[in-house]
């Protein structure tokens, strides 16, 4: 015989539902990570289809990452080299600025600077947890950083990423070995049926 739920159960359910509805937080309509509506980055023209996304320096060779927003592709191009019609004429790491030629036109691309918009939450107070542009740490892309101190959290993160990378590589090798064994077994079965 099945027992009917008591009225107390329904009362508790209604109470929890009411508390849950009141506890919902109204989310801001605009993202604090996006520039303010109508704002255009001062360091990049709004109609430019090419953007400087990064650079890498190994010895004397410098590679520059240029993103083509129309083709939705990025290209790593060495200074004085041409890839798909984009030539890197010059690069200044201190200014984070590249001079390129595309279709006979010379363009200067600058790395976008991180910007933080001052926002408020629904209570009208300043949004907490966001660093101001003055106190935000400077991000240096492409400049080699010293290795993290042994035993530090940064060192542990590096080791964890290396472990995950190694495990993925081992998994790929095992998958290849399994597929080869399957192919070999299929070939042996096919040869056995012919005889």
Image (tube, rainbow, N blue to C red):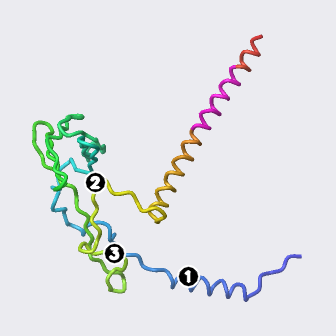
Count the marks: how many? 3
Could you tell which of marks 1 and 3 lies nearer the N-terminus? 1
Residue count near mark 3 (Cα–Cα under 10 Å), binned few <14, some 14–19, many ≥20: some
- Residue 81 percent coordinates (x, y): 20, 35
- Residue 181 percent coordinates (x, y): 67, 29
Q: Secondary structure at mark 2?
A: loop
| 80 up-or-down from 154: above or below | above
Q: Is residue 160 magenta?
A: no
Tell me, yes or no, whether the two marked residues, 1 and 2, touch with CB atoms within 8 Å.
Answer: no
Residue count near mark 1 (Cα–Cα under 10 Å), binned few <14, some 14–19, many ≥20: few
Span highlighted in magenta in the image: 173-187
Could you tell which of marks 3 and 2 lies nearer the N-terminus? 3
| 115 up-or-down from 166: above or below | below
Nearest to viewer (mark 1 / mark 3) = 3
- Mark number for residue 20? 1
Nearest to viewer (mark 3 / mark 2) = 2
Tell me, yes or no, whether the two marked residues, 3 and 2, touch with CB atoms within 8 Å.
Answer: no
| 146 up-or-down from 55: above or below | below
- Residue 194 percent coordinates (x, y): 74, 12
Q: Secondary structure at mark 1?
A: helix
Q: Which residue is mark 3?
A: 130
The quadrant in which the N terminus is found is bottom right
Task: Indicate the quadrant where residue 89 lies.
Answer: top left
* Disc 3 to disc 2, C-alpha distance: 25 Å
The front one of 70 and 96 is 96
Task: Indicate the quadrant where residue 125 lies.
Answer: bottom left
Prevailing SS of the magenta stretch: helix
- Name the residue rendered at 55%, 45% in the picture: 168
Q: Which residue is mark 2?
A: 143
């Amino acid at each position: 015989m099945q027992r009917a739920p008591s009225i107390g159960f329904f009362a508790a359910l209604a109470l929890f539902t009411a508390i849950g509805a009141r506890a919902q937080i109204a989310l801001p309509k605009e993202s604090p990570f996006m520039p303010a509506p109508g704002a255009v980055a001062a360091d990049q023209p709004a109609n430019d289809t090419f953007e400087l996304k990064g650079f890498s320096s190994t010895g004397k060779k410098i590679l520059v990452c240029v993103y083509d927003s129309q083709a939705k592709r990025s290209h790593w191009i060495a200074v004085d080299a041409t890839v798909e019609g984009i030539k890197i004429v010059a690069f200044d790491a201190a200014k984070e600025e590249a001079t390129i030629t595309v279709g006979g036109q010379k363009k200067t691309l600058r790395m976008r600077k991180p910007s933080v918009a001052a926002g408020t939450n629904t209570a009208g107070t300043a949004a907490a947890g966001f660093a101001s542009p003055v106190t935000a740490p400077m991000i240096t892309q492409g400049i080699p950083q010293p290795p993290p101190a042994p035993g530090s959290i940064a060192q542990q993160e590096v080791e964890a990423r290396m472990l995950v990378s190694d495990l993925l590589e081992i998994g790929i090798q095992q998958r290849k070995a399994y597929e080869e064994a399957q192919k070999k077994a299929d070939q042996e079965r096919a040869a056995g049926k012919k005889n």
